[in-house]
Image (cartoon, helix red, strand yellow):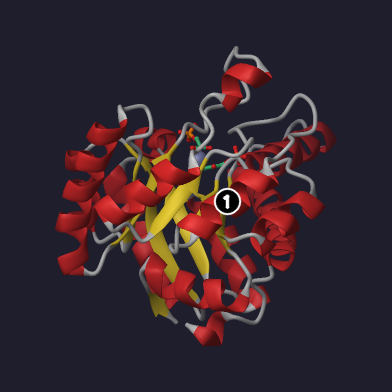
Amino acid sequence: MTLVNLAAILKHAQIGGWAVGAFNCNNLEILQAIIRAAEAEVSPVVVQASQGAIKYAELNYIAVLALEAARSASVPVAVHLDHGTSFEQVVRCVRAGFSSVMIDGSHLPLEENVALTRRVVQLARPVDVSVEAELGRIGGTEDDITVDEREAFFTEPDEAAYFVESTAVDALAVAIGTAHGRYRGTPRLDFERLSRIRARVAVPLVLHGSSGVPADAVREAISRGVCKVNIDTDIRQAFTGKIREVLAGAPAEIDPRKVLGPARETAVDVICEKIRLFGGSSHAKDV
Ligand code: G3H
Ligand code: 13P
Ligand code: ZN
């Protein structure tokens, strides 16, 4: 269909009570898998570039590939910066043609996060680029902290209300018990907190660190106001798992396409399943 911004998708997700899948893209094969899965499910989708992806694949390559994928896809696609680190990086992504950016000032004191996020909104809104911000700290499963220490970083509903009012962001990423990477145990989400945030904040909420979160918990989070669900680790695991399997069965294989092609197909299956779980299937025509 076309390149759209994140707000255009989230508006319909919020009304319809479903969530858009936001999938991290590190290379051509994963990008193709994201688009093929979204087309198979007739769902809008977000292709996002993380800091690691930008370092690995370079912003100019990611932008050209993802923007072309969006323009030629049969479904609406937002091209989004994941965990943007600075105003300058946002400017680079906007200039490259991204339709959406995340500015992650969650490590900053509240007022500095507000100031940075406001500055990004002032840049992005006039050129129709959506802005996601983060309040509270999501962190990684590898962080060496206790459950209590992690809870100290959870999003405070009153602060969320103040933050959204002060910044006018399009979407807010919340810390309610998820973390990036592979979980050691089963993550426990603070649904009650999510509902208190929802009661104070009108903008769509974003769940990061969603790989490895049980399906029922993901559904519950969506029913309580999450409209964008971020997935990276589950795709990486399936993709590299298939590469291992193919090479184990054909150790003499030298053609990368024979190895990466099956991995791409596996990624399509994983992403289709996520889109179905998030309730995005058949919603392409809403946007
Ligand atoms: O932000 C979450 C991503 O999964 C981190 O990915 O290692 O590519 O920066 P990265
Ligand atoms: P996972 O590591 O759980 O896939 O989270 C991805 C994410 O939140 C990207 O921003
Ligand atoms: Zn994240």
**Is 255 left or right of 173, judged from the image as shown?**
right
How many residues crowd around disc 1 within 10 Å: few (fewer than 14), some, or many (20 or more)?
some
Q: With respect to residue 54, does 22 lie above or below?
A: below
The image quarter containing residue 84 is: top left
Q: Is residue 237 above or below residue 74?
A: above
The answer to whether residue 248 is above or below residue 148 is: below
Q: Identify residue for label 1.
A: 196
Name the quarter showing ligand 2. top right
Q: Is residue 147 above or below residue 196?
A: above
Q: Residue at x 62, y 31 (%)?
A: 181
Is 252 or 50 nearer to us in this picture? 50
Residue 208 appears at what percent x and percent y?
55, 44
What is the secondary structure assignment of the residue under circle 1? helix
Q: Residue 278, position in %: x, y?
A: 68, 64
Coordinates of residue 121 in the picture (x, y in percent): 22, 55
Q: Amino acid at mark 1?
A: Arg
Residue 139 or 96: which is nearer the viewer? 139
Q: Quadrant of residue 72?
A: bottom left
**Horizontally, is 80 left or right of 168 in the view?**
right
Taking the spot 67% from the left edge, 54% from the top edge, the residue there is 221
Residue 197, image x, y percentages: 53, 51
Q: Residue at x 54, y 33 (%)?
A: 154
Report the number of numbered marks. 1
Residue at x-position 64% and y-position 67%: 37
Residue that extends furthest to the right in the rendered view of this protein: 249
